Image (tube, helix red, strand yellow):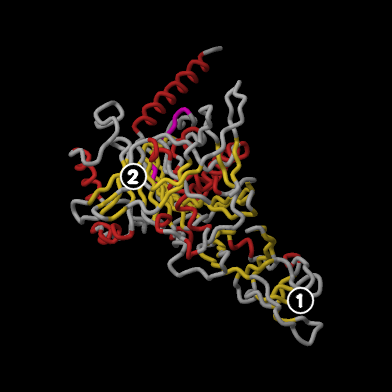
Amino acid sequence: MMVRRTGLRVSGASRPMGLIVRSRFPAPTLTNGDKCVLKGWIDVTAAEAGTDGVRAIEAEAVPTRFARGWHCLGLSERFKDGRPHTVNAFGQKLVIFQSGDGRLNVLDAYCRHMGADLSQGTIKGDEIACPFHDWRWGGDGRCKQIPYSRRVPLRARTSAWTTMDQDGLLFVWNDPEGNPPPPEVTIPRIEGATSDEWTTWVWKEIVVDTNCREVVDNIVDMAHFFYVHYSFPTYFKNIFEGPVATQIMKGVGRPDARPPAKNGEPQMRGNTSVASYHGPSFMIDDLTYHYDDMDLHSVLINAHYPIDANSFVLHSGIIVRRSDKLPAGAADAMAVKLGDFILRGFDQDVQIWKHKTRIDNPLLCEEDGPVYQLRRWYEQFYVDVADVRPEMVERFEFELDTTRPTEVWKQEVEANLARRAAESRTP
Amino acid sequence: MTIRTDNRLLDGAPMQPLSCLQCGAAVGVRKASWHQTSIQWDSESVNACLERRAAAPGGGPNGEAFTGCAALSDSIRRAVLDGVVTVPDAGTEDGQE
C-alpha cells in the first residue's frame, strides 16, 4: 500500500516523523443481545501522531480505477449536431456520436485498425467512420464494414459504453468489470426538466485538476458552506444507504455576504435543500429559496466525470420553476443568475482544492460531518461488486449539532456588518 | 483504499447498541451532544422498521430517500434521558438543554 505522508512540522523539530504503526485492533465490541453490530476488524492507525506529538497527514495513492456507476456527460443536445465529439473520461479518449436512429453512442475513440481517432471522423448512417481508412463502427462497438475490403476481420470490436438519454442529459455507464447497469441502479427522473412550468437547463462545466473525491466530500462538509460559500447552515443531516448519499440542509440568509435587497425587492430569508448523490457522481439538489413573499423552487445538478485520476469535469445545471410571482422571463433570468452564482461557488471550491493536499485521515471535531462514513460509502463504487461489504451500503444517519456553529456564526455576521457600517461612515 | 475509523469514535463517545421501543430494530447509536446523533443501521433493522415500511416516497427527485424514523428518534431520546445512551457533558453548556 502506498502511503504518502505530508509532515506538517512545528519549527525546531528535528527528528524525522515516527513511522506509522498500523495495528489491528479488534473492533469495539458492540453487542446487541448476541449480535455484533460493528463487524469484523477495523484498521486503526495507532500512531498518527509521531513521537513529537505532531499529527501526520496520510494519503494513499489516488485510485487507478474509476468508479462504477452512471456518469453525466452533459446536455445531450450538445452531442446531436451531426458531428462526432471527443470526450476524455475514465482515463481514455472517447467518441460520442448520434447514429441515424437518433441514439447517442459512446465508444473508445481509437480505431482498432491503425489507431486513428474516431472522434475526428464522420458519422455515416448508424456508424462512425474512421478518418484514416473509413472503417465503420457501430454503437455496439463492432466494426460493421470496411468499404474497401470484402470482409471484416475477426475480433473487430472496440469498447462501447451503455448510454442513457434522460431529461435532456446524456449519461454513460462505467463499470471496470464490464457488466451492464443493474436495473435497480438508476438516476431518478427530474420532472421539471421536461415541463413547461420550469425553465430549461442552464448548464455549465469546468475542468478541475484534482481527484474527484474532493467534490464528493462536500456533501458532508457543513462548515465549509459558511466559510467558503458564504451561506449559513442551521440544520444539517446526512443519510447514506445503498448507492445513495443524501444531505438535508436548511440555512438562513447571510446579510454580510450579499447586498441588502433594494426597496421593494423581496429579501431572501433562507433555503431548504435535499441533495442526493445517486451513485458516485451525479447529485440532484432539490433546492428551495425562501423569500419574504414566495418560495423559489429549483433543481440543481452537481455532477462530474473523471478525466483521469487527477482531474475531472465538474458540471452544474439548474432549472427554476415558473410561478405567478416568477413568470417565464423572470424565471429564466433567475435561472441564469443562479447558474452564475453556482459557478462562483465552484470557483470558491476550486481555490481550496488547487492548494490543498489529499488527506485520508482528516482530524474531525464533533461539529464536522461524517467524512469517514462518506468515504466508506464511496468505496463501494471502487471495488468489484462481489467485494462490496455490508458496511459500505448499510444505512447510516448523521445529524449534526448546529448549536455552537450557529451561535458563533451569528456573532461573526454581526461583526462583519458592524465593520462594514463603520467603514461606510469613515470619510 | 483502506477504510479508516472516524477519529471521533476512537477518542470520543462510542457507538452504543439500542433497540427501537416500537419495532425492536437493533441499531448502533452515538450521541456527541444532545442535538448530535449518529445511527448505524443494518439490513435487518432497516427491514424491521415499521415507519420505513409504511413510508410513501416524498415529492421531488430525491423523494425516495427515507429521512428518518420518528419512533426511533423517540427511543433514542428516551434512552438518553434514562441514561442508557450516554451523552458526553450532558447538562453542561454543550449538552442537554
A351 vs B58, left or right, is right
Q: Position of residue A135 (x, y in %)?
A: 76, 76
Residue A252 part of the magenta segment? yes
> Which residues are drawn in magenta?
A248-256
Do tag 1 and tag 2 residues touch (Cβ < 8 Å)?
Answer: no
- Outermost residue on the bottom side: it is A150
* Above or below, A256 relative to B35: above
Q: Is residue B84 visible?
A: yes
The residue that appears at 36% across and 27% down in the rendered structure is A407
Q: For the residue marked with disc 1, what is the amino acid? A: Trp
Q: Which mark is residue B38?
A: 2
Q: For the residue marked with disc 2, what is the amino acid? A: Ser
Give the position of the C terminus of chain A as an image quadrant: top right
Chain for numbered disc 1: A
A173 vs A377, left or right, is right
Q: Residues within 10 Å of mark 1 (few under 14, many from 20)?
A: many
Q: Position of residue B58 (x, y in %)?
A: 33, 57
Would you name the residue on which mark 1 appears?
A135
